[in-house]
Amino acid sequence: MERRKKENLTQEEKQTPKKPWEEKSALEATAADHEVLGSTPPTQLKENPGKNLAELMSDKEILEWLKKSEHAIKVLKKEAPSRGLQWEDVRDREIVKMKVTLKYLEGIGRLPEEFKYFDVDGIESEE
């Protein structure tokens, strides 16, 4: 499908992203993907139609994004109970998102060396 403005998409295209969101890294999503899902794309994506965040970020920015994501998972693990959340539910969602992102970055040759052998599941056993 060529990239078109939301109002030019067919009803089916508006309702069906190319790839289900849970199978797509946040770094892989384009402005069109956000619009199909009814969310507002970041300004960077609006200004660069057809591009995703990974294409617009430097290697250093990708590394920092991954470190922040890892930290966020650890914080969620610690704070889930006090937020009324079950860690198992949070874990399933967040760990899957991190795995999808690592796989995507590896596939496009942008996975930082520091994360090449990163054990996402190991976050589970960290205290």
Image (cartoon, grey):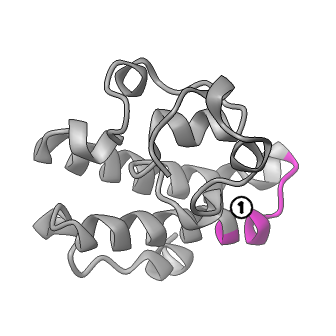
Residue 68 picture location, percent across and down: 38, 45
Magenta span covers which residues? 84-92
Q: What is the three-letter code of the residue carrying label 1?
A: Val
Q: Which element carries disc 1, helix, strand or loop?
A: helix
Viewer-side residue, 101 vs 76: 101
* Residue identified by numbered label 1: 90
113 lies left or right of 70: left
Drawn side of residue 31 relative to residue 77, left or right: left
| x then y, percent, for residue 4 | 51, 33
| Most common SS among magenta residues | helix
Vertical side of 38 occupied by 114: above or below: below
Q: Is residue 33 above or below residue 123?
A: above
Kindly give the residue lying farthest to the right in the view shown: 84
Q: Nearer the viewer, residue 66 or 7?
A: 7
* Total numbered labels placed on residues in the image: 1
The residue located at (71%, 54%) in the rendering is 16
**Residue 96 appears left or right of 99:** right
Q: For the point 64% across and 62% down, which residue is it?
A: 20
Residue 116 in the image: above or below residue 98: below
Q: Which residue sits at x=50%, y=48%?
A: 72
| Circle 1 crowding by C-alpha within 10 Å: few under 14, some 14–19, many from 20 | some
Examine the structure image and report whether residue 90 is included in the region drawn in magenta: yes
Depicted 88 relative to depicted 84: above or below: below
- Residue 29 percent location from the top left of the image: 47, 46
Q: Residue at coordinates 61% horizontally, 24% vertically from top-left?
A: 40
Check residue 74 for magenta coloring: no
- Examine the image and state in which quarter residue 90 appears: bottom right
Query: For this rendering, which residue is in front, 72 or 46?
Result: 46
**Residue 92, image quadrant:** bottom right
